[in-house]
Image (cartoon, rainbow, N blue to C red):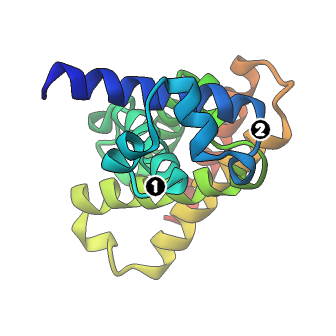
């Protein structure tokens, strides 16, 4: 990639994150983003359709960063969900600063849904027989969304306690599969 394009991309993303940390997505404008990034609007539109497309691209990159932080080899069997849950929590927490910015306010629920979609796809690639298994899909949804919402509602809990309890819950659910 051309270095100028790379610098422009970085300026746009940094300006977006700076603005997003201060205000909700629906209150952001391309004009203020361009001013902060020191670019003109036509440059922005050469890279993104609108502010929502930029947000979506950053959210997707963050979800992929969380997913790539998980050692999928540790989940050698679906029965190893406690080990997997611990790995997921650690991958999630290692990206927490950006998660809090990009998925704050009305966008908070989107992260749980995006993580669920990405994690299930990884599981189905590793275990194709589960793709059409409704019981497994429900179980995975429960574990993923449950862990996400347990985190959201208990952000004051220390990390060790949070990870330990979620892993214990996932381990206890082993009897269902």
- Per the rendering, the mark at residue 28 is none
Q: Residue at x 66, y 31 (%)?
A: 19
- Frontmost residue, 137 versus 47: 47
- In the image, taking residue 22 as reference, residue 69 lies left or right, namely left
Instruction: Provide the residue designation for mark 1.
Output: 53
**Which quarter of the figure has residue 80?**
top left
- Which quarter of the rendered picture does the N terminus lie within? top left
Do we see residue 119 in this rendering? yes
Residue that badge 2 annotates: 23
Where 153 falls versus 133 (above or below)? above
Q: Position of residue 59 (x, y in %)?
A: 49, 45
Can the viewer see residue 100 in this picture? no
Is disc 2 surrounded by few (<14), some (14 to 19) or many (20+) residues within 10 Å? some
Q: Are marks 1 and 2 in contact (CB under 8 Å)?
A: no
Q: Give the x, y percent position of residue 171.
A: 58, 44
SS under mark 2: loop
Nearer to us in this view, 152 or 51: 51
Percent across and percent down for residue 95 are 54, 26
72 lies above or below 172: above
Q: Horizontal and vertical percent for residue 145?
A: 64, 56
Residue drawn at 23 percent across, 55 percent down: 126
Q: Quadrant of residue 65?
A: top left
At horizontal 53% and vertical 51% (from top left) the residue drawn is: 51
Can you say whether 113 is above or below 160 in the image? below
Q: Earlier in the sequence, mark 1 or mark 2?
A: 2
Residue at image location 54% in from the left, 55% down from the top:
52
Is residue 127 or residue 27 the one in the foreground?
A: 27
Q: Quadrant of residue 23?
A: top right
Instruction: Give the spatial CA distance, label 1 vs label 2.
Output: 17 Å
On the rendered structure, is 155 left or right of 54?
A: right
């Amino acid at each position: 990639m051309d270095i100028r394009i790379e610098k422009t991309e970085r300026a746009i993303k940094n300006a977006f994150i700076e603005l997003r940390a201060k205000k909700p997505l629906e209150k952001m404008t391309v004009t203020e983003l361009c001013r902060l990034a020191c670019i003109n609007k036509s440059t922005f539109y050469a890279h993104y359709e609108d502010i929502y497309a930029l947000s979506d691209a950053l959210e997707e990159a963050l979800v992929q960063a969380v997913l790539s932080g998980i050692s999928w080899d540790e989940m050698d069997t679906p029965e190893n969900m406690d080990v997997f849950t611990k790995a997921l929590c650690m991958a999630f927490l290692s990206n927490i600063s950006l998660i809090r910015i990009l998925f704050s306010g009305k966008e908070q629920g989107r992260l749980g849904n995006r993580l669920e979609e990405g994690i299930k796809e990884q599981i189905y690639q590793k275990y194709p027989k589960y793709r059409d298994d409704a019981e497994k899909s429900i179980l995975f949804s429960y574990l993923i969304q449950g862990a996400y919402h347990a985190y959201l509602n208990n952000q004051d809990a220390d990390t060790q306690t949070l990870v330990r309890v979620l892993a214990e819950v996932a381990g206890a659910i082993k009897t269902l599969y």
